[in-house]
Image (cartoon, rainbow, N blue to C red):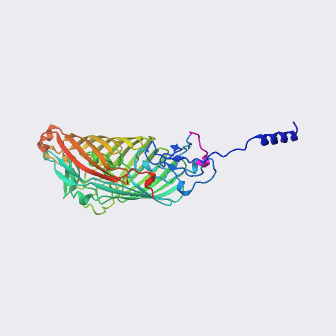
Amino acid sequence: MTFGSKVNVVAQHTEHSPAPTASPARTLYTCPMHPEVVRTEPGQCPKCGMTLVPMKGKKPGTGKPMSHSEHGAHQMHGEHAMHDANGMAMPEHEHAEHEMEMHSSINIADPMNRESSGTSWMPDSSPMYGRMFMFGNDMLMLHGAVFPRYTNVTTRRGDDRIDAPNWIMAMFSHSFSESTQLGLRAMMSLDPLTEGGRGYPLLLQSGESWHDQPLHDRQHPHDLFDELSVSLSQKFTSDLSGYLYFGYPGEPALGPPTFMHRPSAMDDPDAPIGHHWQDSTHVTFGVATAGFQWRTIKIEGSVFTGREPDENRYDFDRPRFDSYSGRISWNPTPDLALQVSHAYIESPEALKPGVNRHRTTASLIYNRVLGPDSNWATSLVWGQNDDTHEGKTESVLLETNYQRKRNTIYARWERVEKSGHELVLAPADLDEIFAVNAVSIGCVRDLSHGDSIDIGLGGQFTIDFWPSELDRYYGGGPGYGFEVFLRVRPSLHSHGVMK
């Protein structure tokens, strides 16, 4: 065939072929927290319940950019391919156009839902209750909770009272570039006002002091300032990142996320009785942490002040930087967070300055989104203290929380080995070790739900068990306690509350 005949064939084909028609404009919707969820119609994310938002970039089939009101975005981590509503892989250049600045304030490489107390990790699928405000590329997230309640604890060492444990937290992040970020965090509590110096009744609890006497069967109040921290993070490659964290006060790399930040415990007003075996270092006056992260594995180390906060809950204690810790964290799936950690803690108790402590912890946190407004979270935590002259004592905790729309059911079981010194017993029993148990079950019904503030009415019942050797102090067991409370906190975060 000659060149001219080729031209004629092409011309004939063009003459008789219908002109291509533009496909109708179609907006795709995605979840700000789960970019793999893409739909052709608005709705809610089946994984976390957040409102789906229009995808940023070009309207499919038009080649035209979306208007500002149509822009959604999301941070992408690693090399996760975006897919359209039919499951087809999207081009890499479009992939980049769907990013949203929703990083952890600690590490720019982390999704926000992974962030917890200090530098600890929760599962990526964890629900996030809070209010988000965007200022250009800067982000501010507010969290908090307050539990106005009446508590009644039986037995000789029990008590009853009206109080309101509470906390509020602000997280701010500013990106210098796509790979460098500054983070600021502040956490405060009005416990010094609502709980007083002795704290609230909690049978078999121990730790810290009041009027130079060790506290027992009460949970100490938290300081007015529980965290004032700054962090700087850097993404070196798509898989490798690092950060520096400094807090005064802050939380070292030790233990699981603190109890009030765990989804499995956020509806329980009480601290665990194994708190001082697991996560009691969450208020530390002077801590510096460095961490490196490769994909879903993180290794970090801290130097910090071993002494726990003093009785003056309004001041800033002297930083000592006399203790150290290390932690390995791994999130193998979006629903699972694992960690192991160890620390040397110099003279944690002011009343026992000669006692030093080695602490080892391990934890497994599982979170599963069951629907648009339904979640199940469970934590298994183990902790061991090895104290000077007292030897090793262990604790284990299992807690779970099931939430479905306005209703929540939760439970907690603990077994802790405590010495006579911890429980403040008679001199003859000071060196003995006693295994104590506590079981709690509670429920909450939200009166206000999903409208910026969730206000829930709840009740909890607790049974405490101790060996017969402690009957002389507590009376014949088991012990019982109950409480009725309001739980007030921000609603589940979604795109609709961004400002």
Side of 74 relative to 403 (left or right): right
Magenta-highlighted stretch: main secondary structure? loop
Q: Quadrant of the C terminus?
A: bottom left
**Foreground residue, 104 or 278?**
104
The answer to whether residue 423 is visible is: yes
Quarter of image, res 396: top left
Q: Residue 42: x and y, percent?
A: 50, 47
Q: Which range is magenta? A: 86-94
Side of 337 relative to 198 (left or right): right
**Residue at left 38%, top 42%?**
374
**Foreground residue, 287 or 187?**
187
Q: Is residue 87 found inside the magenta-colored segment of the image?
A: yes
Q: Residue 361: x and y, percent?
A: 34, 43
* 321 vs 405: above or below: below
Side of 6 relative to 280 (left or right): right
- Extreme top residue here? 1
- Extreme bottom residue here? 315
Q: Quadrant of the N terminus?
A: top right
**Residue at left 18%, top 39%?**
466
**Foreground residue, 478 or 39?**
39
The answer to whether residue 174 is visible is: no
Q: Residue 55: x and y, percent?
A: 54, 50
Q: Is residue 406 found inside the magenta-colored segment of the image?
A: no
Q: Residue 87: x and y, percent?
A: 56, 39
